[in-house]
Amino acid sequence: MNRAQRQLSEGILMTDQYQLTMAQLYFRQGLHTMPAQFDYFYRKNPSYGSHQAGYTILAGTGSLLQWMTEERFTADEIACLRRQTGRSGTPLFREDFLDWLLQEGNFAQIRIDGLQEGRVAHPTVPLLTVRGPFAMAQILETPLLNHMNFQTLIATKASRMRQAAGGRPILEFGLRRAQGYGGNPGVRGALIGGADASSNVGISHALGFDPKGTHAHSMVQAFAALGSGELGAFRAYAEIYPDDCLLLVDTINTLESGIPNAIRVFEELRARGHRPVGIRLDSGDLAYLTLKAAQALNGAGFADTTIVLSNQLDEMVIWQILSQIRAEAPKLGLEPEALIRRLVFGVGTALITSQGAAALDGVYKLTAVNDKGQWLPAIKISETPGKTINPGAKQTWRLYDQRDRAVCDVLAMEDEELDKMAELQLHHPVDSHVQRTLRREELSRVERLRVALPHGPDAPPEETIAEMRLRRDQDLEHLDDGVKRMVNPHLYHVSLTRRLWELKQKLVRERSFPRSKSNTP
Amino acid sequence: MNRAQRQLSEGILMTDQYQLTMAQLYFRQGLHTMPAQFDYFYRKNPSYGSHQAGYTILAGTGSLLQWMTEERFTADEIACLRRQTGRSGTPLFREDFLDWLLQEGNFAQIRIDGLQEGRVAHPTVPLLTVRGPFAMAQILETPLLNHMNFQTLIATKASRMRQAAGGRPILEFGLRRAQGYGGNPGVRGALIGGADASSNVGISHALGFDPKGTHAHSMVQAFAALGSGELGAFRAYAEIYPDDCLLLVDTINTLESGIPNAIRVFEELRARGHRPVGIRLDSGDLAYLTLKAAQALNGAGFADTTIVLSNQLDEMVIWQILSQIRAEAPKLGLEPEALIRRLVFGVGTALITSQGAAALDGVYKLTAVNDKGQWLPAIKISETPGKTINPGAKQTWRLYDQRDRAVCDVLAMEDEELDKMAELQLHHPVDSHVQRTLRREELSRVERLRVALPHGPDAPPEETIAEMRLRRDQDLEHLDDGVKRMVNPHLYHVSLTRRLWELKQKLVRERSFPRSKSNTP
C-alpha cells in the first residue's frame, strides 16, 4: 500500500460500493438530480461499560467540509469503476453514468446545515442535514459518517478526560496504538473535545499546535548499555534542553534511581541558572509515586516542578488518582491541591480508541425527497419504535430554563418558530403517553441550533480549534451537572413538537405493517 | 483539515515529538549514526471480554515498508520543526540537526528482518527486528507501531470471524464507523486475516479487489415516498442489474413485504432468463429470519439464492447464528448444511474496530546498541518480571511435533542454529523453575521464522494478499485446535534457549535495584 494507493483510498472513492450502484440506478431512473434530504444523527451516547457518557461533543465537520471541497471524480476514479464487471461479465457501470460522474461527480450542489463543531450534542437530534442531488448526497453517506462518527467519538472521550482531570492539562499520546492514519483525525477530535495538545508531530503542525514530548525509556537504556547509566542520560538531556528539562524517571527504578538522579541533574541545572521543568512517571502505582516524588522534589527545593503521569490512563483512572492524592497527601504533609496543580496527564490508547466504546452509532437517513418542487417526507419504520426515524424537513432547538440550564432539545418542523410561541407542546419521541406543555416564561432562552455550514472554494476559512473549544466550554457550562456525571448520567430530554409528532404517526400508520406480523418469532 | 494538512500528517512527521527531541540529542552526542537494534513484539493476545484470541495474524509490514520507501524529511517538514521553540523562546531544534535531517532523514539505512505478513504470531516473540542508525530507527518507532499494531489487530479479528463462519464468505462493511482514514489500512488487515472482500471502494481498487455492495434502505424509502413502494424499488434494481440482483428485504417488513416482493421480482427475472442472486437481511432475529426466508425462497424455486446477513455481527454472533440454524432447520424441513452454504456474512463495526479489544499492545524496544563494532545488549527491567525485555540480537524459531503441529516458538541468540542441535534446552521466559529439554527426534521440523524484509526503490514488489492468505492458511492448519478455540484458548508456549535466558539473568542482576525497594507501597 503505497502513497498513490493511500491517496486513491482517501479520495472520493472512500465510500461504500452500494452508494455507487444506487447512484447509477437513480441516474438510470432520472432521479439522480432530484433533491433529497438526509439527516445525520446518532442513537445512543457512548457507553464504556462501567461508565457512560451523558452527551457528546460534535466534531468532524470541518474535515468533512474540506474533503467535500477537494474531492471529486476524476479520470483515475472513473478508470477504477470502468474495470468492474457484474456476474455476466459485462461492465457494472455504463459509460453514460461514468460520463456524468466525471462531469458532475462533486459536492458543489450539496448544502449542509447543522450544529457547529464543539457543541454539546444529544441522541436522535439531527446534527447535520444534507440537501442536494440524490446521487451525490447518497455517495456522501459513507465519508460523512466516517468523518463525523469518529471525531465526535474521540472529542467526547477527550471531554470526559478533561472533566476527570479537573482542568489539569491532557496530552494526547496515542498514535502508536491508533487506527492507522485514523490517528490523525482522532487527534483533531481530541483537541476539540478536551486534549490540550498531542505528541503527534504531523497533525499538530497541520493544525497549528506545538507537539509535546521529551524522551523515552530507550534513551536511558542506550546510555546504560554504553556505560553512562541513567544519570549520564539525564545529564545529556539537560545539556541540550536546559530550559525544557522534563525527565522520565522509571526506566530502572523510580524511587531509588530515577527521582534521585533527576534531582541531581535539576540541582546542576539550577546552579547554572536554569529552571528544570519536571518529571514523568510512566509505570507503577501512579498516585503513590506522585506523592513520593513530590516529597522528594519539594525537599530538594523543586516544589514548582511539573509531574506528568502516563501509562494506560483513562477518565476513571485519572479520577481515582486525584481522589487518592486528595485523601493521602495530607498524611504525608503535602497540600493536595498544590500538588494536583503540578500534574499533567498523558493519555494514549484509551483516548484515541475511545476505550470501552470503539464506535459512535451515527447514521445518515433519508428523511425527504423533492418531487417536482414539493418535499415529500420519507420514513423508515423499525420494529424497535425508538429506531423509527423522524421524517421530513426539521429544525432543532435548545430550551434553557430560568437558571440558564439547557433542559431539552426539541425537533420541530422547519417552519415552526419555537422562539415566537407562547406555549410549547412537546412529545416524547416514542411513547405517545408522555407529553408536556412548557410556557415561554418558564424558559430563559429558546435557541435555534442549526446554522448553514458552507463548503467549496468560496466558503470562509475553516474555524480554529480555539473557537470550537470556546463553544464547547459554553455549552458544558449550561449543561446540568447530572448529565455530565461520568457514571450513570441523567438522561437529557429530546422531544418532538406536536406537529412533527403527528406527521410521524401519520406516516407510520400509512407505511407500516400490522405489529402482530413481527420479524421475530 | 484539508488535503495538504492530511498529507503532512501522513508523511514522516507521523511520529511522536519525543522521537525528534531524542534524535537531536543523539545527534548532539554523536550517537545518531550508531547502529541500534529495536524489537517489535506484543505482550498479550487480544482479549475481547468474554472471548479471547489464542494467536494473532501478523499484518501491516507491506504498508510500513512502502511508507519507509516513500517518506523522508523535505523542506516542508523541516520548516515545521524550525518554527518550534522551547520555553526560553529559542528554537527547539538547531540548524545543524535540521540540516542533517534534510540530508539524511530517510530510512534507506534501516534493515528490517521479521515474520512475513499472514503468519500466525504469538506474544513476546520479536516479530520485526529493526537495525540501523540510532536516530532514524528511533523516529521509526511510532509509524512502525501504528502500521503493525492496527493491521495485526484487525487481521486477527478477521481470522476469528472467518473461523466462526466456517469458511462462508466474510465481507467487510465497516467504513462508516471506522476510525477516519484508518478504515483503509484496516481493510487491508481484514483482507489478509480473513475477510474475502470489502464494501470500501477506494481501498478495494487500490489493493486489486472488487468492492462489494448492492443497495441500502434509502433506495426503498425514496421509492416509497415517491409512491412506487418497495416493489417499485426492487423492480428498478432488477432492471438495471438483472444478473447481479441482490435485494435488501427489511426496509418495511421482512416477512410480510420484503421477501414476498423479492420473490415476485425474482420470478420476473427468471421469466426473462436471468438468475437472481439473493437477498440481504439487516435487522431482526437473523437466524429465525434466515430460516423463514429459506423456506419462502425454496418454495418459489430459488433454493440456490444467496442470503447475506448483516447488522452488528461479530464472531460470537456468527457462531451462534450457525448453531441455531443447525438446531432449528431440521424442524422446518430444511437441510441445515445446504442452507449454511448459501450464507454470506457482512461485518461492519465489530471488525474494523476490533470490538472488545480496540488496540494491540505492541511495543518497540531497544535491545542492543553497537559501540565501535561490538553489539551491546540493552535491557529494560520491569517490576512485572514478564515485562522485562529479552535483550540482544536474537533469532526466532518455531518447533513442530511429529504430527506437524506447531508446539512452541523459541527465542534464541542470533548465532544459535536450533535446526542443527540434537537437544534443545528451553526455559520459561520468566519462571526460572520451568524448563524442559526437547530431543530433535521428537520434532518433525525446526523452522527459522525470520526473513529479510527489504524496502526501498530496489526492493521486490509488494507481496500480493493472496500470497499472505496462503501463508495464513498453512500456519492455521499447523496450529493446535485448542489454541484456535474462540473462548479460553490454550496457551501457546514461547520459550528462551538456555544461552539467551542466561544473558537475560546476567543483565537483570547487573542493572536492577534490589527487589525490596519497590515502586508500589
Image (tube, coloured by chain):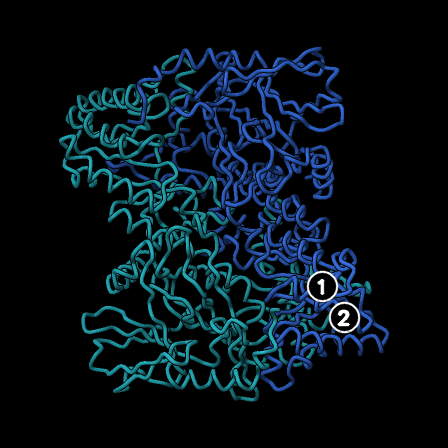
Chain colours: A blue, B cyan
What residue is at 27 percent from the left and 59 percent from the top?
Answer: B473
Seen from the viewer's position, the closer of residues B267 and A285 is A285
* Element at label 2: helix
Q: Please report whichever mark, 1 or 2, sits nearer to the chain's N-terminal start.
A: 2
Residue flagged by tag 2: what amino acid is it?
Leu
Q: Which residue is mark 1?
A: A307
Q: Quadrant of the C terminus of chain A?
A: top left
**Image height check: is A138 above or below A501?**
below
**Image height check: is B367 above or below A160?**
below
Classify mark 1: residues with Cα within 10 Å, few (<14), some (14-19) or many (20+): many
Query: Is the C-beta separation of discs 1 and 2 under 8 Å?
Result: yes
Q: Is residue B471 visible?
A: yes
Where does the image place residue B41, in percent across and percent down from the top left?
45, 68
Seen from the viewer's position, the closer of residues B101 and A384 is A384
What residue is at 42 percent from the left and 29 percent from the top?
Answer: A23
What residue is at 30 percent from the left and 28 percent from the top?
Answer: B247
Seen from the viewer's position, the closer of residues A447 and A437 is A437
Where does the image place residue A452, in percent across and percent down from the top left?
65, 27
Label disc, if present, on residue A297 of the rendered structure: 2
* Element at label 1: strand
